[in-house]
């Protein structure tokens, strides 16, 4: 036995001895009346007894077996999540009555932290996926595809036809496979080489059968209608009926036992209703006030339509975000987290509403005539990117401090409302820096212009309209038209490069070449493309299943931050962002790159645990050489340098 294996064996045995001493404390918890009376409490204790460790960064995590049990056997969405948070509080109260050094206490405290974080994460990540799932299953029902799946038929994207009056129509192969890959990532179907069949778990069949009998009319712009309601406008006719329809027949999940994380019908329906409702609250600027313990009455949200407002509060109650207290509703800990963090991810996904309501048309004819418009949810996108922009701006400041580099031009591409520029302006002011903002959509530029008018953005800021980020020459020519030399300018992009339509690996390299040859320092944030294997293994621990799906549907392309081993399921991942930029001649400044949390709460067998997203920092080759950061003569495109900047 080699030394490394012997160390692992000894470590495992030590943990087993330590957990074996936990019996008295676990028995005390099992005898607690609150935990004993709730079936969910008994399931929770089985998870908390699993070995828990600390990462090198000081974060607790479960071993793989513990995580698998948590994911599959502990329902933790919506109302079940709120129940778990309350049960965790009870466990922690019992633990607080024990001595700090009692055997097993530390392990239980770590496990509690893991479960709480998983519950709070799922409150943000699950609803967008469920919103998409409800739309997609409805489209499949209308086309007869759900019946075919439930009959045991295999769907072959390459030659799948549906009936029409007078004949059959073959569905668009690529669009159908995108849909099926999303269903695969959510455990609804299984992949068999070039076909897909219904997954074998009984709950999948229950869900599809229920969808068959309860498909609601698809909402059209419901987040906008909720905004109108919460802003005090009068609704009537179809608009009012549509909101009332969304608030009817909403039921929380009741059963507390499961052996798979596949969602129930109740969970799908709650997610479907919750996403536009929360975005309506965000658009009406009400989310910021909804902190833990805050009480709301229906008339607080709408004097004209209190019945609709009461329905909204019932949706939030079913989601575990509110709890009823007489005539009022109180924000729960789960809701406080959701209102603070949910609008960003919800808004990103709901932007793709045009694709979902035209699901049949896209499957029959392709998506060429459908396009995303981000205007409705620019505020939500700003929320989602705020922390990553702060990290990028921090890196820029450190780079300048470490190297003595000074820039005179700051550009924000895919500008939205200009959050990255707002932060930079707050730090650096206007003197000595010229600011530019670019975007393809007028709605984004218009919003940024309004931010400049109210003083949040610099008055000298110049805006470039119709600027496709995939065509660098548009921005470069606009800079030159203003008498600005692009060399040494800083460009910061928040989740913008994946919006380049129908991108190939070679095409993405050419995009980066355009910016590199112009001499732009490139800082950009991108969500990390994950494989279907990753998405299934992590279930509701990220919102990347939906994020990946909507971008594939719209012809955009996510990429991993760095090289990944090939997955077992789905399509191969594209070339990493780092590889494309380096092939274009950029030098990666590793010390100024950063990432968010890892997706697995344990280290997988492959040893590769990708992050949710990454902040990239690239220097054009000429600047890297000028600063003495290019190692040796190997500056060619074939083997581009990766430099840890000192």
Image (spheres, rainbow, N blue to C red):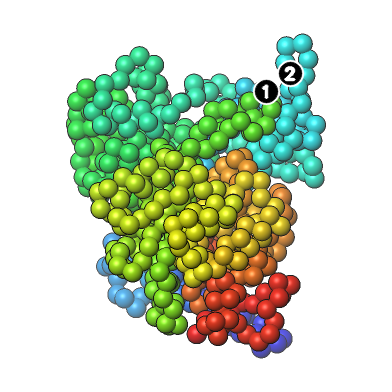
Please indicate whether residue 287 sits to the left or right of residue 249 in the image: left
Label 1: which secondary element: loop
Q: Which residue is label 2 attached to?
A: 163
Q: Is residue 446 above or below residue 19?
A: above
Where residue 447 appears, as percent x and y from the top left, is: 36, 44
Does the CB distance between marks 2 and 1 fall below 8 Å? yes
N-terminal of the pair, mark 2 or mark 1, is 1
**Residue 194 position in % (x across, y down):** 79, 42
Q: Is residue 272 above or below residue 492?
A: above
Q: Is residue 29 visible?
A: no
Mark 1 is surrounded, within 10 Å at the Cα level, by few (under 14), some (14 to 19) or many (20 or more) other residues, namely some
Left or right, 594 with reference to 12 = left
Residue at left offset 62%, top offset 80%: 9
Disc 1 target residue: 144
Quarter of the figure with residue 12: bottom right
C-alpha separation, residue under disc 2 versus residue under disc 1:
9 Å
């Amino acid at each position: 036995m080699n030394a490394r294996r012997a160390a692992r064996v000894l470590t495992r045995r030590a943990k087993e001895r330590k957990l074996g001493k936990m019996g008295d404390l676990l028995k005390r918890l099992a005898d607690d009346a609150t935990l004993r009376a709730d079936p969910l409490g008994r399931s929770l204790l089985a998870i908390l007894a699993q070995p828990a460790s600390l990462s090198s960064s000081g974060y607790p995590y479960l071993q793989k077996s513990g995580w698998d049990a948590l994911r599959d056997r502990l329902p933790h969405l919506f109302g079940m999540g709120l129940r778990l948070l309350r049960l965790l509080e009870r466990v922690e109260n019992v633990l607080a009555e024990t001595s700090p050094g009692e055997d097993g206490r530390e392990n239980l405290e770590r496990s509690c932290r893991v479960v709480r974080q998983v519950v709070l994460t799922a409150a943000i990540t699950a609803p967008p996926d469920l919103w998409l799932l409800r739309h997609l299953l409805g489209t499949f029902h209308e086309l007869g595809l759900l019946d075919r799946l439930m009959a045991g038929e295999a769907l072959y994207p390459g030659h799948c036809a549906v009936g029409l009056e007078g004949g059959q129509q073959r569905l668009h192969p690529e669009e159908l496979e995108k849909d099926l890959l999303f269903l695969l990532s959510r455990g609804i179907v299984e992949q068999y080489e070039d076909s897909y069949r219904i997954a074998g778990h009984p709950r999948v069949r229950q869900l599809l059968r229920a969808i068959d009998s309860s498909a609601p009319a698809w909402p059209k712009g419901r987040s906008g209608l909720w905004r109108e309601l919460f802003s005090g406008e009068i609704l009537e006719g179809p608009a009012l009926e549509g909101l009332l329809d969304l608030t009817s027949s909403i039921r929380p999940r009741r059963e507390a036992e499961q052996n798979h994380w596949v969602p129930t019908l109740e969970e799908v329906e709650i997610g479907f209703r919750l996403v536009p409702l929360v975005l309506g609250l965000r658009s009406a600027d009400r989310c910021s006030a909804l902190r833990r313990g805050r009480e709301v009455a229906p008339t607080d949200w709408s004097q004209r339509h209190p019945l609709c407002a009461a329905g909204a509060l019932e949706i939030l109650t079913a989601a575990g975000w509110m709890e009823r207290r007489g005539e009022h509703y109180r924000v729960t800990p789960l809701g406080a987290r959701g209102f603070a963090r949910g609008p960003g991810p919800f808004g990103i996904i709901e932007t793709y509403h045009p694709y979902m309501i035209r699901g049949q048309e896209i499957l029959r004819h392709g998506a060429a005539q459908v396009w995303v418009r981000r205007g409705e949810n620019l505020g939500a996108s700003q929320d989602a990117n705020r922390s990553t922009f702060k990290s990028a701006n921090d890196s820029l400041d450190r780079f300048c401090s470490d190297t003595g580099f000074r820039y005179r031009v700051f550009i924000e591409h895919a500008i939205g409302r200009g959050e990255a520029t707002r932060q930079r302006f707050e730090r650096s002011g206007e003197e000595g820096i010229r600011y530019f903002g670019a975007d393809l959509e007028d709605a984004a530029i218009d919003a940024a212009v309004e931010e400049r008018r109210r003083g949040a953005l610099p008055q000298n800021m110049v805006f470039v309209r119709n600027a496709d980020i995939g065509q660098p020459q548009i921005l470069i020519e606009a800079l030159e038209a203003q008498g600005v030399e692009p060399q040494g300018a800083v460009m910061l992009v928040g989740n913008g490069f994946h919006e380049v339509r129908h991108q190939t690996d070679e095409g993405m390299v050419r995009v980066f070449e355009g910016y590199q040859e112009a001499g732009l320092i490139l800082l950009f944030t991108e969500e990390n493309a994950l494989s279907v294997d990753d998405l299934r293994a992590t279930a509701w621990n990220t919102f990347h299943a939906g994020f990946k799906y909507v971008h594939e549907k719209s012809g955009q392309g996510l990429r991993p931050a760095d090289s990944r081993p090939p997955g077992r399921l789905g399509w191969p991942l594209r070339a990493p962002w780092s590889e494309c930029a380096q092939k274009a001649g950029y030098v990666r400044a590793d010390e100024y790159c950063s990432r968010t949390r890892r997706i697995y709460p344990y280290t997988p067998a492959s040893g590769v645990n990708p992050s949710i997203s990454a902040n990239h920092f690239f220097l054009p080759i000429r600047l890297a050489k000028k600063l003495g950061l290019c190692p040796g003569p190997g500056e060619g495109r074939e083997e581009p340098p990766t430099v840890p900047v000192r």
